[in-house]
């Protein structure tokens, strides 16, 4: 799992490109991103992908989005 601090707030992003990772991330799908200042300095973003683990991807593959509170709560529930 991520080396990012678990006290930092997660954010949500939508995938807009998956050219190099078609199995790991799906176009137009919402993902939870984990703050990682080291990665962002390298134009990367840490995202919890289809495996349920967080990995680094090119930041331009995603666009940040703001979810309504009810949706954010639904996304935060573990399966």
Image (cartoon, rainbow, N blue to C red):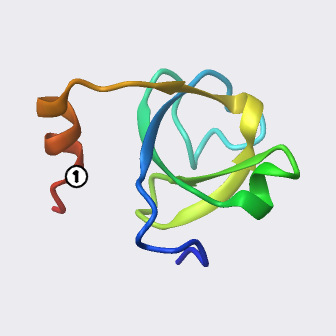
Residue 74 screen position, x and y as percent:
14, 42
From the viewer's perspective, tell me whether residue 63 is left or right of residue 17: left
Please, is residue 5 above or below residue 9 in the view? below
Q: In this view, which residue lies farthest toward the right?
A: 42
Please, is residue 19 above or below residue 10 in the view? above
33 left or right of 78 in image: right
Determine which residue is flagged by label 1. Answer: 76
Eyeballing the image, is 19 above or below 9?
above
Q: In the rendered view, does 34 fall on the left or right side of 17?
A: left
**How many labels were placed on the picture?**
1
- Looking at the rendering, in which quadrant would you find the C terminus? bottom left
Name the residue: 17% across, 31% down: 69
Coordinates of residue 44 in the picture (x, y in percent): 77, 48
Q: Nearer the viewer, residue 19 or 10?
A: 10
Residue at the spot 76% in from the left edge and 50% down from the top edge: 40
Q: Residues within 10 Å of mark 1 (few under 14, many from 20)?
A: few
Whether 30 is drawn above or below 74: the answer is above
Residue 32 at x, y percent in the picture: 42, 46
Residue found at x 41% / y 63%:
52
Report the side of 70 relative to 68 (left or right).
Answer: left
Task: Residue 63 in the image: state x and y as whole percent.
Answer: 59, 24
Q: Residue at x 61, y 21 (%)?
A: 16
Nearer to me, 58 or 5: 5
Task: Determine the secondary structure under disc 1.
Answer: helix
């Amino acid at each position: 799992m991520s080396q990012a601090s678990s006290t930092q707030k997660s954010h949500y992003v939508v995938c807009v490109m998956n050219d190099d990772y078609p199995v790991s991330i799906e176009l137009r799908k919402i993902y939870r991103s984990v703050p990682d200042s080291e990665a962002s300095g390298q134009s990367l973003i840490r995202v919890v992908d289809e495996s349920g683990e967080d990995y680094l991807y090119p930041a331009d593959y995603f666009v940040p989005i703001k979810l309504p509170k009810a949706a954010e709560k639904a996304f935060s529930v573990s399966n």
